[in-house]
Image: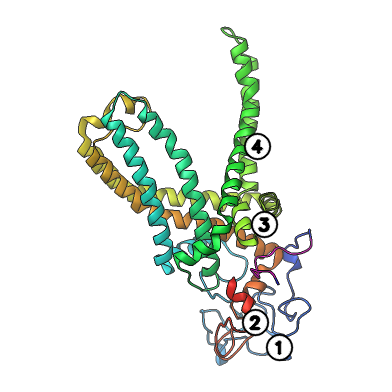
Amino acid sequence: MTDTPGWAPPSSSEQPGEEGRPPAGAPTVPGQSSPHGTTPPAWGGGYGGPPPGGQQAWGGAPGGQQPWGGQPWGFPQSPKPGVIPLRPLGVGEILDGAFSTVRRHWRTTLGISLGLAVVQQTIVVLIQWQAYQNPDSVLPVVSALAQVPLTLLIGVVATALLTMVVSRAILGRSVTVGEAWRDSRPRVLQLLGLTLLNALIMLGIILVSAAPLIGYVIASRPDPNPGLVVLLAMVLGAGVLAAFWVTVQLSLAAPALMLEKQGIGAAFSRSRRLVRGSWWRVFFISALGSVLITIIAGIIEMPFSLVGLAMAGDEAFGDSLSAGLDPALPPAALVVIAVGGVIGGTITIPAGAAINVLIYVDQRIRREALDIELTRAAGLTEPGPTGPSGPTGPADDGDPAAARL
């Protein structure tokens, strides 16, 4: 048993697909029988199939009535101790689980994201205020560039803390900000290194593909060959597509590093294995989640931005704005816009992190039957009078290691 049961990768290097999920009637964990001498059907296999011998499904009611959860008689419902049902997830269930995590555990998720958003917006406002005080300086450029590493660092801390929150929310357990920080702190530096290495890999691919074009344009000035320029531009485009493909391949490395307690190289390998054969699915869910979060953030921040620009008046359309940089706005307008950024970030930061973690969990459920382990960790190993968790409901006492999940 590992320190974090249910998240440890299988010992085999080959990851089983959905066809390798335990059949109905098999023990919950391979090689382990039910503690009461019976073998309950596996939650992951044979959804909707009637129980052996024509018996009534768990939670079913006589006379064709619907059991708990609204499913018809004879269709056992997947357990849902937390924000997602423990089975392969649909796109809507992943997105709903992300926002359900924010809604159900709002004290922790919003507490984390509020603190991070306040820090981010405070630093941005200070830099832009200095740009307003010194309009002829290079501070507008600094303001534009400083937000890149700042956003990167905020994202690392948010991912570290919120990954722990989501992992508990899946099992229906709450966690405080202090507990999330205690669990994630040993991995934060590794996560920062993974994030930087990931960014360098993407940037390296693009720079390598752009080098021939840049070198040729410089060397052939002032009369480059248009056909060769187009050809080298196509090489650059292929490099950008390759970088994008690699980005999706490595998109699950962060939750793998945090939850499986692996090194950076092992986390990258795990992400590639989990995404293999599901690239388009992972890309679609990630892109859809990003678009949804961007729309929500825009809706929240737009009124504040309009008010701030109205307060700035003509100062909002100076030389810095025409140069494509952040305008040097007066302090009052900066504060109003920052308030909108804080509110938008408070809501969208945890949702974005939760979507990534739930994609990781869904891929492991599909490939490694992780739902079986999570069902056991939640105390839902066999049926009982009150549902699949037994007569006393979910309990951690029967599995001390599961309490640390």
Q: In the drawing, does residue 133 fall left or right of residue 93?
A: left
Identified by mark 2, the residue type is Thr
Task: Check disc 3 and report the residue beneath it.
Answer: 262
Range drawn in magenta? 2-12
- Mark identifier at residue 35: 1
Of callouts 2 and 4, the N-terminal one: 4
Of callouts 1 and 4, the N-terminal one: 1
Badge 3: how crowded within 10 Å, few (<14), some, or many (20+)?
A: some
Of callouts 3 and 2, the N-terminal one: 3
Q: Disc 2 versus disc 4: distance between alpha carbons?
A: 44 Å
Task: Check disc 2 and report the residue beneath it.
Answer: 381
Hey, which quadrant is residue 28 in on the image? Answer: bottom right
Badge 1: how crowded within 10 Å, few (<14), some, or many (20+)?
A: few
Identified by mark 1, the residue type is Pro
* Residue lying at 45% horizontally and 52% vertically, measured from the top left: 292
> Would you say the magenta stretch is mainly helix, strand or loop?
loop
Contact (CB < 8 A) between labels 4 and 3? no
Q: Disc 4 versus disc 3: distance between alpha carbons?
A: 26 Å
Contact (CB < 8 A) between labels 1 and 2? yes
Badge 2: how crowded within 10 Å, few (<14), some, or many (20+)?
A: many
Task: Check disc 4 and report the residue beneath it.
Answer: 242
Contact (CB < 8 A) between labels 1 and 4? no
